[in-house]
């Protein structure tokens, strides 16, 4: 009998898969997508078979044997293996690590995978017979069987207790998969507004693969359209995936979906325990979870019958993984939808410039919602000129007066500042010393509540000093503002109302955000101070004033996406205001959005205030086109870092030499120090690859990336390649 070899992906940082011999006892059982235990060096690893075993001849002495087969059923369906292979190629990441990224922790360690889909119960024929005979004192059992009389039911709709166990044991009741349950809505959907109706017709117009950009202003009822699209899929027995950019936004989406569909809604994000994640993963795989709401990594869930993907807030930078396997969940979703031939909805009030460009060139369909449900458009952003104003902890008198006015009128105020801590630097007024991070080219941020200096780049901490490290003087002053300082200032100024801070320091504990959000809805919290955590997706009906403490930094941000991000954040945070107008009888005063700036004439701000985000996007697209930046070109960034200062540039110079002969239609920059050259003790440098053609860029990467580790200069250097980088830091 001839021997068989199987290609296995193992979790090692190497750009290849490994062949193993299939022992006779596993012949005919081992299938692509199953996990195996294999020897690797002196270790034993869990890997995934990527292909069906193939007959092999010749000298096979060099190969080792698969030791154990861990799955009875295919764990990763073919679709997932193909998607992983594509992602490994496109992002130039080791295939074993990509496959690894698709599995939850329990399954990586080789724990057994059970794929239960017993979401529903049905009465069997013997069950019907039993029901007729059961004595009336068997109350619980009778009522269970009776409830199942009309047809299968979800478990959750049935009475719990020992009766169910008896019924299952006796064969009177059997389980059925989720897809076999009758589809019912748990609530009656609202009637669509005329604008929503038009969008709905447009959304439904095509079948098969289709990317629709649903560009709807904040509060225009995009979610209602997602829900309807999901309903169609569930009705056919399909599954849907809804992605949100942040863990904090998943509970409200899960709640909305449960309210509409009842059972079968699962969540998947890194805020869940490993056990919970594994459960959701397996339920997606088995089909028991009919809708999954998740963050970035959920794009790789192994659905049994995926028929729709929705990406809410598609512009959000969190969809891009920034370390290790650097994929964009949005772009992976587009590819996945294409391979499956299913629709994808990208929803946003402020689409990414890449997405707008794809809509312009006809690759995506654009469907617009220009009005809010209820009435009118979101409030306009007005500039508040700071020049010549005295500031109290970064807040101008006119802004503070506005807060007072809105509080008096029964409204709520949100002050937005995208910086945590008390102040971004601590300055010695006597000698000019500024507390630096010892490991980064950066300043330490003062966190006054914790009495510490913290570096926001490497996490280094130290107690806040009471004297200058340089001259010993006692005159240390915090300079600039963070959320803590704004919170303090507002508490002092408005002691009679409750002010709360929303940032990742304050919301470290599980459940805290939910509690505070409830406090906002009930009106208990009157002033909100927060970072982008507050900007996204939340619905605050009583919020009438939004004050943007500062956006000036972004106008001069070193990254080419800084102004785009600023425009998105400002528009999103502005969109939290005035959402109840016309819906809840105008309880809150008319909404206002004020942006403090020293640069009211800046063209980007002018454009944003006059024409909103769409106008700003026009301006930025024209700038990008003139500069040959994305979406008018494609980028990849080769990064290197080392403890030894001169090595990264030396490595990149060697890399450049290796790349240059293959760089057909691709521009290679010179190796340059990173914007923040030293971070966390490492010296960092980068090399930019730029091309008008994605194919040319891919060809170059395919020819060279796997050879970079072979360069002698690669020793003592950590390097990585970032395809379609989100930023150039
Ligand atoms: N047809 C409708 N009739 C009545 N109310 C509706 C309708 N559609 C949506 N709503 C309500 O209007 C509000 C705003 O809708 P939704 O949250 O879906 O907007 P959105 O476009 O997703 O907003 P954002 O981009 O800010 O998240 C919600 O309270 C929603 O329940
Ligand atoms: Zn640091």
Image (spheres, helix red, strand yellow):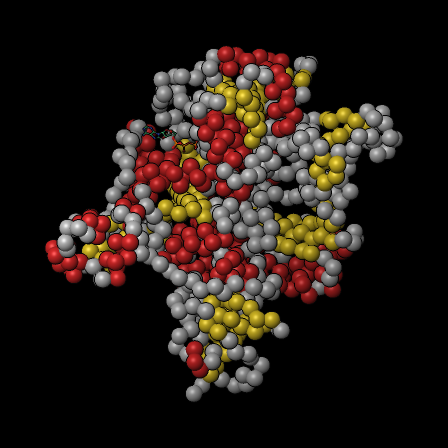
Q: Nearer the viewer, residue 484 or 314?
A: 484
| Residue at the right extreme of this rendering | 471
Percent x, y of residue 400 = 59, 15
Looking at the rendering, in which quadrant would you find the N terminus? bottom left
Q: Nearer the viewer, residue 642 or 285?
A: 285
Percent x, y of residue 422 = 67, 29
Residue at screen point 51% across, 45% down: 271
Q: Is residue 424 left or right of residue 613?
A: right
| Residue at the left extreme of this rendering | 132
Q: Nearer the viewer, residue 223 or 658?
A: 223
Percent x, y of residue 57 = 49, 84
Q: Nearer the viewer, residue 170 or 90?
A: 170
Looking at the rendering, in which quadrant would you find the C terminus? top right
Dividing the picture into quarters, in which one does residue 213 lie? top left
Residue at screen point 69% across, 44% down: 458
Residue 193 seen in this snapshot: yes
Looking at the rendered structure, the number of numbered marks drawn on it comes to 0
Q: Is residue 385 left or right of residue 235?
A: right
Residue at screen point 75% across, 48% down: 681
| Looking at the image, residue 378 lies above or below residue 230 | above
Q: Ligand 1 is found in which quarter of the picture?
A: top left
Percent x, y of residue 674 = 71, 45
Dividing the picture into quarters, in which one does residue 470 lie? top right
Residue at screen point 43% across, 17% down: 588
| Residue at the front extreme of this rendering | 137
Residue 382 seen in this snapshot: no
| Looking at the image, residue 327 lies above or below residue 545 | below
């Amino acid at each position: 009998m001839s021997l068989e070899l199987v290609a296995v992906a193992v979790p090692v940082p190497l750009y290849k898969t490994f062949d193993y011999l299939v022992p006779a006892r596993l012949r005919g059982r081992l299938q692509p997508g199953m996990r195996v235990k294999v020897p690797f060096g002196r270790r034993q690893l869990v890997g995934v078979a990527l292909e069906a075993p193939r007959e092999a001849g010749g000298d096979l002495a060099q190969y080792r044997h698969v030791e154990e087969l861990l799955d009875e059923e295919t764990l990763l369906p073919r679709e997932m293996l193909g998607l992983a292979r594509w992602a490994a190629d496109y992002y130039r990441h080791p295939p074993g690590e990509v496959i690894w990224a698709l599995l939850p922790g329990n399954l990586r360690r080789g724990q057994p995978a059970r794929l239960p889909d017993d979401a529903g119960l049905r009465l069997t024929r013997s069950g019907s017979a039993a029901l007729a005979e059961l004595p009336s004192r068997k109350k619980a059992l009778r009522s269970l069987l009776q409830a199942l009389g009309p047809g299968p039911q979800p478990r959750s709709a049935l009475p719990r207790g020992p009766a169910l166990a008896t019924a299952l044991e006796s064969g009177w009741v059997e389980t059925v998969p989720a897809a076999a349950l009758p589809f019912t809505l748990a609530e009656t959907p609202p009637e669509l507004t005329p604008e929503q109706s038009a969008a709905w017709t447009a959304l439904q117009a095509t079948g098969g693969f289709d990317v629709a950009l649903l560009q709807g202003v904040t509060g225009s009822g995009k979610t209602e359209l997602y829900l309807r699209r999901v309903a169609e899929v569930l009705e056919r027995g399909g599954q849907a995936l809804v992605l949100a950019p942040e863990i904090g936004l998943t509970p409200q989406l899960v709640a909305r979906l449960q309210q509409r569909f009842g059972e079968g809604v699962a969540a998947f994000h890194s805020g869940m325990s490993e056990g919970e994640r594994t459960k959701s993963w397996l339920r997606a795989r088995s089909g028991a979870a009919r809708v999954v709401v998740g963050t970035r990594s959920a794009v790789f869930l192994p659905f049994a019958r995926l028929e729709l993907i929705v990406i809410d807030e598609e512009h959000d930078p969190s969809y891009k993984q920034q370390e290790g396997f650097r994929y964009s969940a949005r772009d992976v979703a587009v590819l996945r939808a294409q391979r499956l031939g299913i629709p994808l909805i990208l929803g946003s009030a402020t689409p990414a410039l890449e997405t707008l460009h794809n809509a312009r060139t006809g690759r995506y369909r654009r469907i617009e919602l220009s009005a809010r449900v209820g009435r009118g458009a979101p409030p306009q952003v007005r500039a508040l000129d700071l020049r010549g104003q005295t500031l109290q902890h970064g807040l101008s008198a006119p802004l503070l007066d506005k807060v007072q006015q809105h509080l008096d009128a029964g409204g709520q105020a949100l002050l937005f500042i995208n910086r945590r801590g008390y102040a971004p630097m601590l300055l010695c007024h006597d000698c000019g010393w500024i507390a630096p991070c010892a490991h980064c080219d950066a300043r330490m941020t003062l966190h006054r509540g914790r009495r510490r200096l913290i570096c926001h780049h490497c996490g280094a901490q130290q107690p806040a000093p009471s004297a200058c490290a340089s001259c010993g003087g006692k005159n240390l002053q915090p300079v600039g503002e963070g959320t803590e300082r704004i919170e303090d200032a507002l508490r002092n100024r408005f002691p009679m109302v409750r002010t709360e801070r929303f940032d990742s320091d304050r919301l470290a504990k599980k459940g805290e955000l939910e509690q505070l959000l409830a406090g906002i809805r009930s009106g208990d919290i009157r002033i909100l101070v927060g970072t982008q955590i507050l900007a996204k997706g939340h619905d605050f009906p009583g919020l009438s004033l939004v004050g943007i403490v500062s956006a000036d930094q972004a106008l001069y941000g070193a990254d080419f996406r800084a102004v785009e991000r600023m425009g998105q954040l400002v528009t999103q945070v502005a969109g939290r205001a005035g959402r109840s107008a016309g819906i809840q009888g105008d309880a809150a005063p008319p909404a206002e959005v004020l942006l403090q700036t020293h640069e009211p004439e800046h063209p980007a701000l002018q454009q944003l205030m006059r024409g909103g985000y769409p106008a700003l996007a026009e301006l930025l697209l024209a700038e990008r086109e003139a500069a040959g930046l994305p979406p008018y070109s494609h980028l990849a960034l080769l990064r290197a870092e080392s403890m030894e200062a001169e090595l990264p540039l030396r490595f990149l110079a060697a890399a450049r030499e290796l790349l240059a002969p293959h760089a057909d239609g691709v521009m290679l920059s010179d190796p340059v120090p990173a914007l923040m050259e030293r971070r966390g003790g490492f010296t960092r440098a980068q090399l930019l690859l730029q091309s008008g053609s994605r194919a040319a860029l891919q060809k170059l990467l395919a020819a060279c990336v796997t050879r970079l580790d072979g360069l002698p200069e690669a020793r003592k250097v950590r390097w990585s390649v970032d395809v379609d980088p989100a930023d150039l830091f």
